[in-house]
Image (cartoon, rainbow, N blue to C red):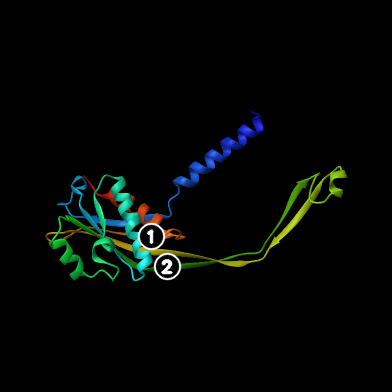
Amino acid sequence: MQPKNLSRICLQAVLLTTLSSCSSTSLTDSWQAPTLHGDAMNNVLVVGVLANTTNRILFERGFVQALTDKGIQATASYDVIGDAMPTREKVTAYVSKSDIRFVIATRYGGSEVQKERVPESVRTYYTGPYYPTYAGYWGQYGNSVTMTQESYVDTKTTVVLTTSIFDAKSEELVWVGRSKTFEVGSIAFEANELAHQVISKIGK
């Protein structure tokens, strides 16, 4: 293998590792009751309190998948309650006739919009003796290209979520945390990522 190709492959591997380790969701604060122990987490009902049914389904399934990956039995409320907005009455009615031990509910807590003006920039790039024109191929000193980027407003939206864990039988709050998600892409992916962070935050 040519050294140049080997260097390119190594660089791509480093970039892939860096990107895959980046997290767009982060817990900002949390509280845990002394009665809750992480190793007791099982038979969990996941409730996404979201007005949009499609978003709710994607969120709940992403969360359930993350819990399942951790060996925790979990059920999406959509599968057992239906597509109507989950209410306390509906959740309580299902819990009372099931073996659910904990209810994890995530509620949309608003959005934070941050705007920043990016100033105009002018950059000159040396393109080498072969580009950008055919005539440049015959030049000894190569070519350069000047590119101008006009100023623009960069808008970043941060979604705030509140996740609460309740003891299903006593209905007492045993854990609560707030999270921020930057540049929301796949709802299922963000839910999966949030679930992993919540579970890792709960003490044993």
Using the rendered view, name the quadrant where residue 128 is placed: top right
N-terminal-most mark, 2 or 1: 2
Q: Residue at x 81, y 49 (%)?
A: 143
Type of the residue with mark 2: Glu
Front one among 17 and 97: 97
Front one among 105 and 31: 105
Type of the residue with mark 1: Lys
Q: Residue at x 66, y 29 (%)?
A: 2
- Contact, CB < 8 Å: mark 2 with mark 1? yes
Quarter containing the N terminus: top right
Q: Is residue 139 above or below residue 108?
A: above
| Residue 192: x %, y % from top left | 36, 53
Q: Is residue 171 visible?
A: no
Using the rendered view, name the quadrant where residue 186 is placed: bottom left
| Residue 113: x %, y % from top left | 46, 68
Q: Residue at x 48, y 67 (%)?
A: 114
Per the model, the C-alpha gap separating discs 2 and 1 is 9 Å
**Residue denoted by label 2:** 112
The numbered dot on residue 180 is 1
